[in-house]
Image: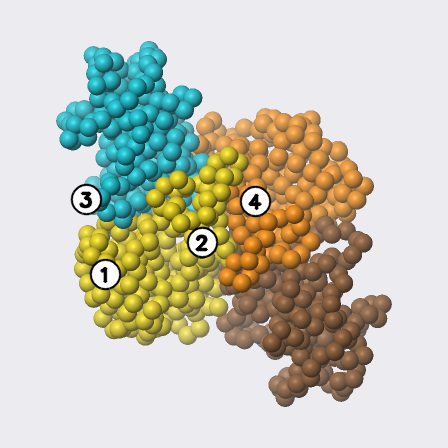
Chain colours: A orange, B cyan, C yellow, D brown
């Protein structure tokens, strides 16, 4: 689809998130994280029991760290919980479940989720703790692990620029997981730093074509 | 098959498209659709060789050898278009991001199986994006004549041509009417002009249910 | 790696191709095909028994159609041989072997080859002629086929612009399979329409970062 | 461990890098390498959060919150740099397009197994790109002190810490010398300064071959 009705308020956008949902959140740490949307989710929604798919669970009291303090995260799927000591404590005290994936597998699984790939074999993690319970197969003499795609009910992404139909352009290393997550959710909500007229983004340089984007929100 | 009948099928198919949808159009009848869509219908055309936002055919001084569609015809790109590589393009298709694929077929079974890429005994050397599109698009609309040039029904109880995918057709539009897949079976839901149900039965191999809807205003 | 020594002549570049090699060739039909490199391969090399991985086998006497007429292609891996009737005839007369893949599977297999993915499950082709001999698996109730990655000894790609270290930028629908193939070969040779100074390409808009490119050749 | 010893390890590691190579640098000792490389060494630095062509740390008026490395420190981008998303970045890593990864480790076994992401009994909640890098990079150079802060050897017969990958270390550089993986086993190939083989043996858990090369000029 595409963005139908122009930008909406963040509070309205995040009302798409229901208790029990799986939510992808872009960003590497807080860089490229959709902070306006996360704040709206923390302040204007009471959706709980969320499964969060994000490389990190924010920082203490910042970004996803807010939702963590509110006790609204049931499970995290990440490559690096360690960047938020409160997330580590929550896991160790049994308050949230944790699924840890190698960062490349995490990224590839999200891409697979958006690309209709139902599983892929990677050599990364084979023979380690992180392969436990997963199918292993030796391919061309090398042990591989079968990894499953990741999908979400809602993806929250941040882009520096977006046009009115929802084409997105990311800036520098704020790109990271955002373009992948935009492809892998039933509803993708894009927080945009600067909303430009349709036609202003160079079609060769659109990082996320609009067919992946459902709602557009201006950063605050 | 007259051009008029093809235009009729294309016109009916165009009515299936809704504002904001992303549509991939196969060769043949589906390619008549863009000129039938008015300006600002809000439908976005995707071509699997790497463009979302296909515009009208260029006039001579707009011709650009680097800008073609999947049928290798020159096209233009509309404002808001995006270019991407083939892996990304098929990730869009396979990942369910194309709302509608409109394509031709050699046969469609009454279970919605589609055969549209190969004829038995002939070369099976070109599949292109056919399989990806019928598997991946959220809605698959088949536009085809009711019978082949030698008079055989193309809606059949079982495809005899090599399959493209099983249970993939959501809507089948011929010059005689419209079938929709309901609970795993094609149901005749609409008759074209003064066509009668018996006309459709005699152009179809196999039995089907009839559940006529009011034809929406054309 | 990166482009070490600046642009080379096409004849020198294609001397990397040996008899029996697998060669990927970019382009959708002739759009985006590296015609200077193909011509050099046809005219200045006698490498034979080639396996060609390309969406099409050129057109009659044009692009890869030249190599076909020279009888130097042993096998084609493509989604659409049909665009060159001479390729169809060569297959039917047993002069070349043909492996046909759905176009999306073809693209994804090349990406997988470049991305260290040893296999992936796709629903496309399941239950059809093109799944014969392949492992099938029902995942979440849907039949899938296990597809293997494609790799090559040498990839020949075309980009409208490239800088001196080998960053590439493709123009419009001439992009197609080129960026994928650039990642999936032991040696990647890029034919470039316009060679610009390093730093002239916008780092946000580089389509193929230079670590994928080994040799640079100017289009003739 | 003095800063001087760390600098020694970093300097020796820097000598392993060749012009034109693409290098990913882990946190700790590897991060001392960029300032040791002269201008125009022709080495390109990749950071897995999405940049090829990492430049020096910015001064205050160059600071850009959108431009960081994988350790989340501000960096700059050199001419010829490219930005990309995380799937592309790890496709580069896993696909063998990173020539060298230089990284720290908790333990390396004499078979080249690396343990560098988790300590038993502690949280195993952060792996980041560690596994991808040691599996995917063409050459893996481990830079670490010979012994842990509590005096235990870090080159061991068998890793007791959770593995990152098996047989992944190509070169191990400590303040005492250099090991290289040859035929599946670490071989001591170089001694630092006036270090003797026995010094390395007493800082190592397990037996290893010695095959000293002439130390290249520093």
Write down the chain letter for disc 3.
B
Q: Residue at x 77, y 58 (%)?
A: D119
Residue toward you, C65 or D8: C65
Q: Residues within 10 Å of mark 1 (few under 14, many from 20)?
A: some
Q: Residues within 10 Å of mark 4 (few under 14, many from 20)?
A: many
Checking the image for residue B60, the label placed there is 3
Residue B38: x and y, percent? 29, 26
Q: Do the residues labelled 2 and 3 touch (CB within 8 Å)?
A: no
Q: Which residue is drawn at 44% across and 41% down?
A: C123
Please state which of the two labelled residues, at mark 2 or mark 3, is closer to the viewer. 2
Residue B201: x and y, percent? 24, 18
Quadrant holding the C terminus of chain B = top left
Task: Determine the image quadrant of residue D161.
Answer: bottom right
Q: Do the residues labelled 1 and 2 touch (CB within 8 Å)?
A: no
Q: How far apart are marks 1 and 4 (CA)?
A: 41 Å
> On screen, D119 above or below A34?
below
Checking the image for residue C95, the label placed there is 1
Residue toward you, D111 or A51: D111
Please state which of the two labelled residues, at mark 3 or mark 4, is closer to the viewer. 4
Residue located beneath label 4 in the image: A148
Taking the image as shown, residue A105 lies to the left or right of residue B99, namely right
Please state which of the two labelled residues, at mark 1 or mark 4, is closer to the viewer. 1
Quadrant holding the N terminus of chain B = top left
> On screen, C179 above or below C16?
above
Task: Determine the image quadrant of residue C188.
Answer: bottom left
Q: Distance between the residues labelled 3 and 4?
A: 49 Å
Marks 2, 3 in one chain: no
Residue located beneath label 2 in the image: C148
Residue toward you, A16 or D61: A16
Residue D13: x and y, percent? 64, 74
Q: How crowded is mark 2: few (under 14 residues within 10 Å), some or many (20 or more)?
A: many
């Amino acid at each position: 689809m595409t963005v139908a009705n122009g930008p909406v308020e963040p509070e309205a956008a995040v009302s798409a998130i229901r208790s029990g949902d799986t939510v992808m959140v872009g960003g590497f740490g807080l860089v490229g994280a959709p902070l306006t949307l996360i704040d709206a989710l923390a302040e204007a929604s009471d959706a709980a029991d969320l499964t969060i798919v994000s490389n990190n669970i924010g920082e203490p009291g910042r970004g996803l760290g807010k939702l963590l303090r509110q006790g609204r995260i049931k499970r995290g799927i990440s490559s690096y919980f360690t960047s938020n000591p409160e997330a580590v404590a929550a896991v160790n005290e049994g308050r949230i479940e944790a699924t840890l994936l190698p960062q490349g597998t995490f990224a590839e699984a999200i891409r697979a989720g958006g690309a209709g790939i139902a599983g892929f074999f990677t050599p990364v993690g084979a023979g380690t703790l992180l392969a436990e319970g997963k199918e292993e197969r030796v391919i061309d003499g090398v042990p591989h692990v079968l990894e499953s795609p990741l999908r979400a009910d809602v993806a929250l992404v941040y882009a520096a620029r977006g046009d009115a139909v929802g084409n997105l352009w990311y800036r520098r290393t704020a790109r990271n997981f955002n373009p992948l997550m935009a492809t892998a959710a039933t509803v993708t909500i894009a927080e945009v730093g600067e909303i430009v007229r349709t036609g202003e983004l160079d079609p060769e340089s659109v990082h996320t074509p609009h067919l992946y984007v459902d709602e557009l929100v201006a950063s605050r | 098959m007259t051009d008029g009948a093809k235009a009729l099928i294309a016109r009916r198919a165009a009515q299936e498209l809704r504002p904001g949808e992303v549509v991939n159009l196969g060769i043949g009848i589906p390619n008549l659709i863009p000129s039938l869509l008015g300006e600002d219908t809000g439908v976005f055309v995707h071509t699997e060789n790497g463009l979302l936002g296909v515009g009208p055919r260029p006039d001579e001084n707009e011709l650009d050898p680097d800008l073609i569609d999947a049928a290798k015809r020159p096209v233009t790109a509309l404002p808001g278009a995006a270019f991407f590589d083939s892996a990304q393009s098929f990730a869009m298709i396979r990942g369910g991001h194309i709302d509608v694929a409109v394509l031709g077929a050699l046969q469609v079974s009454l279970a919605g199986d589609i055969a549209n890429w190969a004829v038995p005994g002939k070369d099976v050397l070109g599949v292109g994006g056919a399989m990806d599109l019928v598997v991946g698009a959220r809605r698959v609309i088949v536009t085809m004549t009711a019978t082949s040039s030698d008079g055989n029904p193309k809606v059949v109880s079982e495809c005899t041509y090599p399959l493209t995918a099983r249970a993939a057709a959501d809507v089948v539009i011929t010059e005689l009417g419209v079938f929709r897949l309901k609970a795993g079976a094609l149901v005749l839901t609409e008759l074209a002009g003064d066509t009668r149900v018996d006309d459709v039965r005699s152009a179809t191999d196999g039995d089907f249910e009839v559940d006529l809807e009011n034809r929406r205003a054309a």
